[in-house]
Image (tube, grey):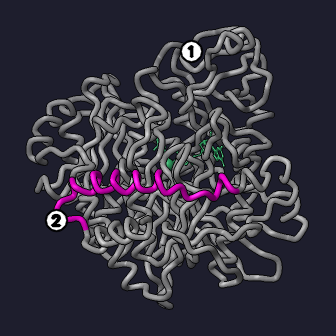
Amino acid sequence: MSLTKNPNVNKWVDEMVALTKPDKVVWIDGSQAQLDALTDEVCALPEGNRDKMYRLNEEKLPGCLYHRTLPNDVARVEDRTFICSRNKEDAGPTNNWCDPKEMYAKLTPLFDGVMKGRTMYVIPYSMGPIGSPLAKVGVELTDSIYVVLNMHIMTRMGVAAFENLGDTSNDFVRGLHSKADVDPEKRYIVHFPEDNTIWSINSAYGGNVLLGKKCFALRIASFQGKNEGWMAEHMLILGLKKPGKETKYICAAFPSACGKTNLAMLIPPELYKEQGYEVFTVGDDIAWLKPGPDGRLYAINPENGFFGVAPGTNAKSNYNALASTRKNTIFTNVAINNDDMTVWWEGLDKNPPENATEWKGEKVNGKEFTAAGNKLAHPNSRFTAPAENCPCISPEFNNPQGVPISAIIFGGRRAATTPLVYQSFDWTHGTYVGSAVSSETTAAATGAVGVLRHDPMAMKPFCGYHMGDYWAHWLEMGEKLGDKAPKIFNVNWFKQDENGHFIWPGFGDNMRVLDWIVKRCDGEIDAEETAIGYLPKKGDINVSGIEDEVTPEIMDKLLAVDKDLWTKEVSEMREFYKQFGDRLPKALAAELDMLEDRLK
Ligand SMILES: Nc1nc2c(ncn2[C@@H]2O[C@H](COP(=O)(O)OP(=O)(O)OP(=O)(O)O)[C@@H](O)[C@H]2O)c(=O)[nH]1
Ligand SMILES: O=C([O-])CC(=O)C(=O)O
Ligand SMILES: [Mn+2]
């Protein structure tokens, strides 16, 4: 039975039911009783059923579940992701495009009858705190209980979202998902920005099927934001509290698997803790930003949980993330310790379980298996954890107005060229710096890992329209914000020595860089003006306690601006910018010219 009187929702659901022909339609109200019943059902599926989920150790991991996806379905598929705007030019050169009519015609037969013998779940959800002026409602239709249970963690799911939408509004994002046969040849993740619509088929991996996340909160929302005067960005949001001062809020955009969750949950090194510094997490992946009544830029995290990379997460590297996963969490594609039904992944500790099931489902001796060079967990295995579990969740997490942003940080994985940190001269230059982000690819998307590619603002896979128009929107927002605009910085935690070792310790020690950034925002310290921007003066990055690791010589390397490498970077950027044609904002072309001049 429908949970809303809204005729726009009901008409659309009826149409999708007529298309996909499920045996049964279940409206998700968000109640615990309903979630428990669905959990029972999906855990009772027979061994070998690909939808099956498992309950984990009720004492050690209460309320936690395990699931594995097919080996061909473990990451986002950028080559099968489409932006179907009516005009090809509006999708821009960084997106796959197809005419919407053609795409509907191609996908309709795939969806026709796809839910026969299955149940369709109708999931109402809010991205952003219910009732927030920045929040938006979506409805996802899916034939997957795994999706329902994940959406419960990742969004504000349930009947309250319909109440928020109201009985007449048509402003909701229509998401249709079917795992179908999980056939990679027929896998499509398709966005129709002008229709507020997402169709996803033949995948069961989170990034492709939790439609509130990348599909809505970035691809569709970036398009909405351009039209409505706000921004949807692939950014974490953190609060940094210095003793005796107001908390400062910072957003940071890094490409997938480049350290957002880790930075968002950072634990300051001893020396900062002693002085009373604290870091609070508002979000770890997506920010929606809008100018507030006082003219400053405010951010909310549209999500309600963390869909985080498991490998590498441990009590030392990211205690807060690990702690977030100790209850009511779903683990996907990690390994199972069959002795006590707990989970394991590379980097959790040095003791792979002997009696293990690896991520593909094979029972192995984990010690021998890993000693032979195999991975027990997939490199893109993930946890879906409720934000409320996070020990350092911000008291402002549910604030409907969001938090005021003082600094925006861009970054990527760069073995060379980009220094540890620098500040842009102003917003326009900062927009250039964001447009110039390049990063080595990771396991978060299918394809080769470690290849340097352009990933402007970490939005290459997520911008739902022409990247040139997106930059123009950034510049417009800067004009609107004027002198209240956040300061823009760039960081690189991943600089390497000749032997391929990272020369910056990273993780908690990134606090030392945040400290410099906040001091710059507060106008507390000077900086070195260089061709690329403002760099820390010698001694201004506090290395107390890590002097052995970060010697003055290493710090010189971390902060070096190599003219030859940067001149190469400029010609590389000229090449990159060409594809944007007239839609490349003149101000950015001018920034590139000025950078070139400064390097001479
Ligand atoms: N060397 C180094 N590695 C880091 C640092 N921060 C994170 N990493 C590594 O980067 C990987 C991904 O980090 P995450 O924080 O999960 O990345 P993310 O940007 O949240 O990823 P998505 O969820 O895909 O958007 C982890 O396995 C870490 O090992 C750092 O400061 N230094
Ligand atoms: O979307 C996903 O699959 C996970 C994620 O956060 C990213 O890749 O940036
Ligand atoms: Mn992400």
Q: Position of residue 60 (x, y in %)?
A: 79, 34
The stretch of residues the image draws in magenta is 556-584
Residue at the image point whose x is 27% and y is 27% from the top: 116
Say whether residue 581 is left or right of residue 497: left
Q: Which mark is residue 407?
A: none
The quarter in which the C terminus is drawn is bottom left
Work out whether residue 166 can be spotted. Answer: no
Residue at the image point whose x is 10% and y is 38% from the top: 105
Considering the whole magenta stretch, tell me its main secondary structure: helix
Residue 570 within the magenta-colored segment of the rendering: yes
Picture quadrant where residue 166 is located? bottom left
Q: Position of residue 204 (x, y in %)?
A: 41, 32
Residue at the image point whose x is 46% and y is 57% from the top: 234
Say whether residue 409 is left or right of residue 96: right
Determine which residue is flagged by label 2: 582
Count the marks: how many?
Answer: 2
Q: Which mark is residue 361?
A: 1
Q: Earlier in the sequence, mark 2 or mark 1?
A: 1
Say whether residue 58 is left or right of residue 570: right
- Judge depth for marks 2 and 1 and give the one in front: 2
Tell me, yes or no, whether the two marked residues, 2 and 1, touch with CB atoms within 8 Å: no
Give the vertical position of 407 relative to 121 (above or below). Answer: below
Work out whether residue 457 can be spotted. Answer: yes
Residue 294 within the magenta-colored segment of the rendering: no
Amino acid carrying label 1: it is Gly
Q: Position of residue 506 (x, y in %)?
A: 70, 50
Q: Position of residue 264 (x, y in %)?
A: 64, 57
Residue at the image point whose x is 74% and y is 44% from the top: 317
Amino acid carrying label 2: it is Asp
Q: Nearer the viewer, residue 436 or 242?
A: 436
Q: Nearer the viewer, residue 446 or 137?
A: 446
